[in-house]
Amino acid sequence: MAFFRRSKSTDTPAADESTAADAAPEPEKKKGLFARLKQGLKKTTNVLNTDIRDLFKAEGRLVDDDFLEEVRDVLIKTDMGVGSAKEIVSELARQFRSRRVDMDELLGTVKAKLKELMAQADEPIRMAQSGPTVIMVAGVNGSGKTTSIAKLAHMFAAEGKTVVLGAADTFRAAAVEQLKIWAGRIGAEIVTGAQDSDPASVAFAAVKKAIETDADICIIDTAGRLQTQLNLMQQLEKIHRVLGKQIPEAPHEVILVLDATTGQNGISQAEHFTKAVHCTGIILAKIDGTAKGGVVVAIRQSVGLPVKFIGVGEQAEDLAKFVPDDFVDALFEDIEQPAGKS
């Protein structure tokens, strides 16, 4: 088992960003997060911008069955799911059927209904009452799992918390090396094991190190693929049990990383992982790479898990706490009026 200690010198990027974040007024920080969220959702907004604007003429549209079907198709195109789209369209029918509606009225109602559907408790990470908070992170290979762990660790480091990383994806040397690099950048310790060694033993050692060093956070990476799905789920269950032997309440969070660009396939992944390791929340990665950002809505509705964070870019700081109202506002922020309307 290998332990790597990383010092937090004042010239590291993490330290500089932490100082800047602490100094920034709250409204400024909020504005910055919203701007990154908007940028991350730009591809999806562009789809909505074109398609919704095309539904309208300057004088508005009569809300009849044909119009409602067109609106539903636009919403489904963003991958938010048939169920969510139907609920929104039902609300539009209830409020506006047989009368003319302009785009502002329509969007106001769509946004209000989406915010209702997306509502969730405002608790990104459930922190331990004492000792380190243990966060187990799961997800298929290629989902953005390792990068999301690094972003999560960077966020905690910027808050002044000490972090230990456990590289328990021992079947992928590249994942371990990538996590080592990130640990160096953010000033975190990392615990690794030999290639193909027992992932649960690495997880156990990482939590042990976090306890010994009085760390605030311990984040455990896990494998995203074994020979069969059954093997993978059994391995994850074993890690989950081992963490609980160190700290009875651990893991305090089991975060599932999903790739937003996979769209509806993410729902199936969420169902399988949740069954195996009792996931408590989701990080939706690569939201900036998809024109189907509405999948956040579908996952929230289908799986019932809260979306904790979304990845809105490739930089270490591009992990935004998921605030449903901000997400909906950003999604529709730049919708333009139809031609002919001032």
Image (cartoon, rainbow, N blue to C red):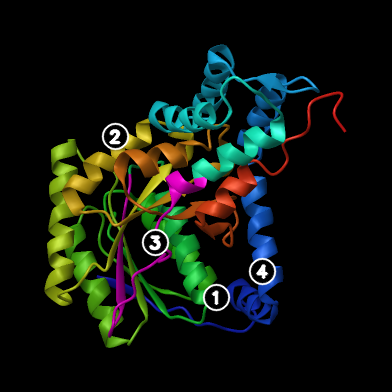
Whether residue 140 sits left or right of residue 239 in the image: it is right
Image quarter of residue 26: bottom right
Disc 4 or 3, which lies upstream in sequence?
Answer: 4
Q: Nearer the viewer, mark 2 or mark 1?
A: 2
In the rendered image, the vertical position of residue 235 relative to residue 179, given as above or below:
above
Disc 2 or 1, which lies upstream in sequence?
Answer: 1
Are the residues flagged by discs 4 and 1 in contact, CB closer than 8 Å? Answer: no
Residue 302 badge: none
Residue range in magenta is 115-139
Q: Secondary structure at mark 3?
A: loop
Disc 1 marks which amino acid? Ala
| Crowd around label 3: few <14 · some 14–19 · many ≥20 (10 Å) | few
Whether residue 44 sits left or right of residue 245 in the image: it is right
Q: Nearer the viewer, mark 1 or mark 3?
A: 3
Disc 4 marks which amino acid? Lys
Question: Residue 133 or 187: which is nearer the viewer?
Answer: 133
Task: Write the residue at 19% across / 70% down.
Answer: 204
Q: Secondary structure at mark 1?
A: helix
What count of labels does the image hold?
4
| Crowd around label 4: few <14 · some 14–19 · many ≥20 (10 Å) | some
- Measure the alpha-carbon separation of dots 4 and 3: 21 Å
In the rendered image, the vertical position of residue 275 relative to residue 178, given as above or below:
above
